Every structure is written in structure tokens, then in C-alpha cells.
Image (spheres, rainbow, N blue to C red):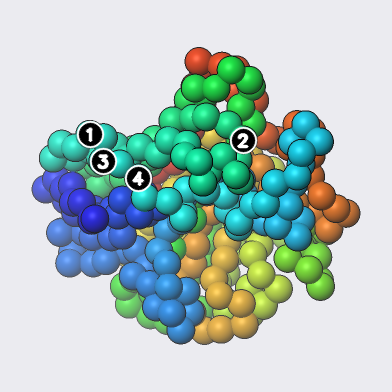
Amino acid sequence: MIFTIENKHLKVRANTMGAQLFSLYSKDTDTEYLWQGNPVYWADRAHVLFPFIGRMYKGDYTYQGQPYRARAHGLARYNLFHMEERSATRLVFLLTESEETLQEYPFRFEFRVIFELKGKTLITRYKATNTDEKTMICAFGGHPGINVPFGEGAFEDYYLEFSEPTKAKRHLLDDNEPYMANQCVPYSLDEGKKLPLKHNLFDNDAVILSNTSRIVSVKSQSTHKFVTMHFEDFKYIGFWHAVKTDAPYVCLEPWSALPASVSGQDELQTKADMFHIPPAKSKEVSFTLEIHE
């Protein structure tokens, strides 16, 4: 079921299936900023990534020596959430464990996706609470697709711009398999902070960066409109559209951890960058999308 929240500037829709954002619409300029899904390129719009990012090696991992299967990006995108709370400008979706989830992820939990509007900003929060008797291990990530173009001009007129120059690093994907290559290299940005958008940028899948500022905008010389993401709680940022296509969108993907590497199967307890949440405790992260017009 799709629910709507709105204020004087923005109207947002989100789906209980996967707690997926379905629309980020500006009333001020009659502009839809969120990719609306098209199976020719990518049928979805804004996956929620929990409790894993990307793929586990060959779809498997181990926990305390036991093997488990894991689908790409974890559980959230495949499960129906419960609408726990709703007001004019706030939605709270809740997912808890089930017999099915325990086959993939051996923890009891409460996972909330919270959408809240403030002015021209959409705040997205992820909150995981450990309701198990053992330490819960997880990661969080976002995947919103932004329409490009969302104003005048063509895809190639747009660029990504970080808030300040840094010596960014790129985490490479393997050339032959959809896993990390265990290589991190310097990544050159124009003026230390700009990345021009070209369709062939994604011919080898996502561009995954770290050591950037935690603020990035989608901009163009062809329009005064732009979209800014703040992702202070996330170590990595990925950019993606469907591989080797002319897809008219770009995904902004804040990640707290990386997918599996080509070197082999992960043991969950030792996987890098994962959050370890003690029993009866919670971990919350957030990112925002701010519309400038």
C-alpha cells in the first residue's frame, strides 16, 4: 500500500512493500525528482538496504560457522512493512523478523524506516533495534534514483558536486564478477569535487567512493534547480544507473559498509564496517534529500 505525506512545498509517497520511496514531488515547480521506475532500465525507485549492502559472495555467508543464503541488498526490499505511525508530514514503517527472515538472517529485530518532511527537505532515518539475546550485526544503505534531467538540458549537462574538495578514493568492483575487487585507488574529481555525468561512467557498474565530503548535489548548468544529499552517517557513497544504457536517472547510494569481495565468502562476525548492536539496544542513521529551486 502506498501512503502520502506532504507540506506546502513537497509531496512524498512511500510503499509498504520494502518501505520504498515512490515519489519526491515539488509542488512549487511541478517537478518529480524521484525516478519513477521503468523495466527497460530499472523497475524500482529507491531500495532500502538492510541488513546487508550489495551481494554476499555467491549469495552465501556464514555466522558462527552456519551457512546462510542472502539476497542482494538484504531483507528490506523483499518484505512487506507494517505502517506503524502516520501524520501529515511523517511516516514510520516497521519490519520485524519472521520464520522466513530467520532463514536468511539469524537475528530477531525491529527495523524502522522513517520519512519526515521539513520544508524542502525529506529526512530518511533507518533504526534497527536488537530484540534478540545475542549481538546483532547489520549494515544500512539507501538507493534513491534521481531523475536526470529533472529540468532543462540532457543527461550529459548534469554533474555531481561534493560540498568541498577532497582526495577521494574509489573502491573497485571486479571486472568479471559482481563483487568488490579489494582495490582502492585515488579518484580524480574536477576541481577536487565535481563528477560530470556520462552514461558510460556506469559501463562497469557503480562508482563507489570514500574519503569524500558527506554532502553531494546533482546539478546542471542548464537549470537553477538542484538536489542535495546529506549523508553524514555513512562511510561510502555509490553512484549508479543501469549498466551500458542511456538510463535517464542516477542513484545516490549512501552505504555504511561494502558488498562482499571477490576473495570469497564472508563470516558475518568479522565482515568489515558492520554495526554490532548489543541486545535491547538500537542503532539509527539518517540521510536527507534537499530540493533547491
Identify the element where label 3 is drawn.
strand
With respect to residue 68, does 109 lie above or below?
above
> Which dot marks residue 188?
none
Q: Which residue is mark 3?
A: 83
Tell which circle, 4 or 2, labels the residue nearer the N-terminal end: 4
Neighbour tally class for label 4: few under 14, some 14-19, many 20 plus, Cα within 10 Å? many
Verify CB contact (< 8 Å) between mark 3 and mark 1.
Answer: yes
Q: Which residue is mark 2?
A: 106
Which of label 1 and label 4 is nearer to you?
4
Neighbour tally class for label 1: few under 14, some 14-19, many 20 plus, Cα within 10 Å? few
Q: Which residue is mark 4?
A: 81
Q: Which residue is mark 1?
A: 85
- Along the line of sight, the residue nearer the viewer: 206 or 128: 128
Residue lying furthest right? 263
Three-letter amino acid code at disc 2? Pro
Tell which circle, 2 or 1, labels the residue nearer the N-terminal end: 1
> Where's the C terminus, which quadrant?
bottom left
Query: Could you tell me how far apart the alpha carbons at marks 4 and 2 are, in whole angstroms?
Result: 19 Å
